[in-house]
Amino acid sequence: MPQTIYYSGGDMRRYNVIKQTIDTDLSTAAAARMLGLSRRQVFRLKAAVKKRSTRGVRHGNCGRSPANAKPKHLRRQVIGIYQHDCFDFNFTHFTETLAEEFSIQLSRETVRFWLRA
């Protein structure tokens, strides 16, 4: 099943300007001024658009989850433990309890971020 890709207005504007440099006589210098980029970046975008069409204007990691992201089920588990067993703990104490009693190793900042969201 193909993944749906959404483009912002800026992405579409960038694609249209780069497409004009490929199809018409718009110079790379003019395109660079229009987009606020260097000529080198316009050349790079032109090559990417020729190779990958509209996907060439987006970053390669766009739509992917970060490599250091924790699994969603772990987040749900931690929030559940906090709500049912440790609701009166502060973030540091709760993080230490997770490590000692539940063998879940997380940073205090990750726990704080999850519980405050």
Image: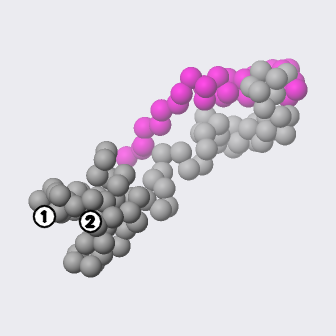
Question: Across the whole image, how many numbered discs are drawn on residues?
Answer: 2
Residue 79 horizontal side relative to residue 111, left or right: left
Residue at position x 71%, y 42% in the image: 48
Amino acid under label 2?
A: Phe
Nearer the N terminus, badge 1 or badge 2? 1
Q: Is residue 26 magenta?
A: yes
111 vs 8, nearest the viewer:
111
Residue at position x 28%, y 52% in the image: 115
Residue 18 horizontal side relative to residue 77, left or right: right
Residue placed under numbered mark 1 in the picture: 85
Amino acid under label 1?
A: Asp
Q: CA distance from mark 1 to mark 2?
A: 10 Å
82 vs 71, nearest the viewer:
82
Specify the quadrant of the image occupied by residue 79. Answer: bottom left
- The residue sitting at the left extreme is 84
Place of residue 54 in the rendered image (x, y in percent of width and height, measured from the top left): 61, 34
Decide: few, some or many residues near mark 2? Use Cα within 10 Å; few <14, some 14-19, many ≥20.
Answer: many
Give residue 76's mark. Answer: none
Specify the quadrant of the image occupied by residue 74. Answer: bottom left
Residue 94 horizontal side relative to residue 15, left or right: left
Residue placed under numbered mark 2 in the picture: 94
